[in-house]
Structure formats: C-alpha cells, structure tokens
Image (cartoon, rainbow, N blue to C red):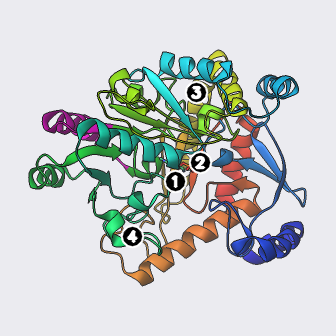
Amino acid sequence: VKKEYAQKCKGSIASYERAKKVIPAGLEHNLGLLNPYPLTMKTAKNASIWDVDGNEYVDYLMGGGPIILGHKVKEVDDKVISFLENYGPSTGLTCESEILCAEEIAKHVPSVEMVRFLASGTESDLLAIRLARTFTGKTKIIKIMGSYHGWSDQMLLSPDRPGTGNGHTSGIPKECYMHTIEVMPNDFDGLQRIFNENKGDIAAVLAEPTGGHAGTFPNHPDWNKTLRKICNDNGAMLIFDEVVTGFRLGMGGGQEYYNTMPDITVMGKIITHGYPSCGAVGGRREIMSLCHPGGLNGKSAYTGGTLSANPISTTAGYHSLKCIEKYHAIDKASDYGDLLTAKLNELFATRGDLPFFAYNIRSIVHVETACPSGTFLVKDSRNVSDDEQKLRSKAAEDIYIALMNEGVLLLGDCKRMYTCMQHDETTMNKTLAAWEKV
Ligand code: PMP
C-alpha cells in the first residue's frame, strides 16, 4: 500500500523533502501520516479535501474534529473578512465578538454560566485544573487512563495505552505526575479505592464524557453518573473535557447528551470551527469568577494568553455556532454517522473471517479492526507485549494508507471518522467501496 501511495502522491513527497529540512519530522500536525510521507493538502470544500497532486479524498479527519458544518462556510468566512477589514486581526482589548460568543456558549451548554477563552484545548485543560485546585484548596487530579487532555506535563500520563502506566514522552520529570492519579476506564472499585486512599486530597476528576479518545475506550453507561456522585460525596470537582464533544454531541455537548452536569467544562475545536485560536473553559459563576485578576475571597487562578479570545476566533465562533443551530448541523452529521456505522457493519458481516465492527457516538464513528494476530487493535493494552503492539500499529497504519489510496481520509491511524453535515450519498458510496476493497 505504501508503494501505491508513493505513486499517487509525488507532490506530497516533494513537499515532505522540503519540509523536513526546516520542520522536525517534516510535519507539524501529529494527526498527519508520518510513514512513508505526510500528505500535503491543497484545498478543501464541504466534505472533501484535495492534496497537492490533485487527489480527492472524502474527509473524515475534519480538521481533527473542529469541522461540523463542512469546509469553507461562506456565511462565517464573510463575517470574519468583514471584521478584519474594519478592525484588523487583534487589538488586545475587549471586543463585542467575545461577549457574543461567550453568551452563545452559556446559552447552550447547561452547566456553563461564564466562559473564559484560551488559545487551545491544552491550555483550557490547564486552566480547568487550576480552577478546581483553587476552588477546592486540594491538589490531586484523577485522570482516566487512555484519555487525552492535551500535552501539558501533568496530563501526559499514558494517554494512548490504558494500563501501561507509562509517561508518554521524555522531557517530563516524574515529579510533574506526582499529583496525577490514573484509574482504568470503568473501574468502579478502583475509583472508590483512590478516593479512600487520598481522603481530602482529590481536587477533581477529569474525564471525556464519551470515554477516552472520543470513545475509543467507551464508557460503561453508569460511569459518568458515578463520577458525578463520587465527586459530590468527596467535595471534588467534576471536569468534563468537551474539546471533542462540545457542539458535536449536541448544542449542550456531552453533558446534555449523557445528562450529567460537570462543575467545569473544557471546550475547543468546534467553538471556533477551525479558526485559531481555539479553547475555552466554562462553569458556574462562583468557580469561573476565580479567573478574575483580583480573585474571589482572596483566591485567584491566574489566566493569561495574548491571543486568547482573539476577535477572529470569537467572530468565527459566534457565527459558526449560529450556523450549527440554524442548519441543524449536529443532527445531520449524526444521522450520517448512524447510517455509516450501520452500512459498515453490514459490509463487515459479509466477511465473517474479518472480525471488524463499527460503532458510533453520534457523529464520531469508530471502526475497531483486528490486526494479523487476530486481536483487536486498541481496546485494551494492559497485557499487550511490545511486539504485539508493533503488529497492531502496523496493521492500523496499513489500513489507514490503503483507505487513503481509495480516496478516504480518516483521523490518523486510529480509524476514527468525524462526520459533518456535508457528508452525503456520494461520500457514503465512495467510503463503502473503499472499505470493501481494503
Ligand atoms: N482534550 C481532548 C479531548 C482533545 O481531543 C484534544 C485535542 N485532540 C485536546 C484536549 C487538546 O486540544 P488542543 O489540541 O487544542 O490543545
């Protein structure tokens, strides 16, 4: 599959040769393919993208999650352009767009009364943790293994392989993980044990409402409610990382979809619909007020960011959220997600020798595939040897490249597909034909 890819993507190869002289590994986005060459894109429209060689792809990467209206939304772009013509990109002062965007988020997300914008999801997770510690006066944070909460030092403990207990990267002193405690997904007893062993020290539980990596490690149906209850019982905050789920599972995000209210909500991605800079933290007034430089009752959680609440992002955000509501983008993308999942499972059922299956959480579609050893790729890595893990990674990568050769682009090699309101019958047929061939 790599040979075929290299044949089709000569322009991307040339671009990679140039990039790797000035950009480490020749790519800036980890979601891009590393081996053999990253794809260099040229243009995008609706649910498709084209690379520099003119190859067209049905896009399920969707910018890594921010896009749900489809690529290039004229209604939003026009507002941003007109803003730029009038004001320029950034003044460092308050601008109406940030008030409008904050009002819009607070209107829809049930647990959110106030919003503070930041420049990324990573920064937003950082602020949420700081707010929880400031509010509770406690220190430790419980994280669910296999969940991703950005790349800050304290949060990069085993985000990919639940059960390995390994730090993800070099360059982080182990002291940085000192106050991060991990629990396996859906381990109800383990969760209780951690609270018992750390009485009075847990500031917050931080969790993706879908389960780790947007549902790659799905939650037991009682898990979110259990998190809520155990936090209530122990005076800890529940933080939902809704960077992916915010304005994707519903206008009220994962908290509305799962009917579980967090104390603090972390947002990113769709709130600016692909425009930089993109991140926000929301919550109750009494918690969020701690971001105030003067603080509340002598406590203040410092928050910074030159480009936070950037008027371009908040203009794009406000108008995108309006469009998402007006065009019922979430329901349309979710209906396509349901249909795609059903059709993929129909297809997989015709090949009993391939134990593949698809499942979705609205517009987030996952395909779980087996590697050559017959074991599933990502579900549980607790007892997986390094050799088995290598085999799994290779199988995942081969499937990913083979699908790209057929004109279908997934998210990295993890076989996640984000759908948008522009996916239609044509993209469906192309996608199913590609999976069938692969
Ligand atoms: N949390 C979750 C659940 C995410 O999926 C991501 C990004 N994929 C982040 C946080 C970090 O966001 P950013 O890349 O904007 O820093």
Residue 203, position in %: x, y? 25, 44
**Does residue 129 lie above or below 374 as drawn?**
above
Residue on which disc 4 sits = 167
Amino acid type at circle 2 is Met
Q: Residue furthest bottom?
A: 387
Circle 4 packing at 10 Å, graded few (<14), some (14-19), many (20+), is some
Residue on which disc 1 sits = 367
Callout 2: helix, strand or loop?
strand
Q: Earlier in the sequence, mark 2 or mark 4?
A: 4
Amino acid type at circle 1 is Val
Residue 66 quadrant: top right
Residue on which disc 2 sits = 417
In the image, the segment drawn in magenta is 218-238
Q: CA distance from mark 4 to mark 3?
A: 35 Å
Q: Earlier in the sequence, mark 2 or mark 1?
A: 1
Amino acid type at circle 3 is Ile
Residue on which disc 3 sits = 330
Q: Is mark 1 within 8 Å of ligand 1?
A: no
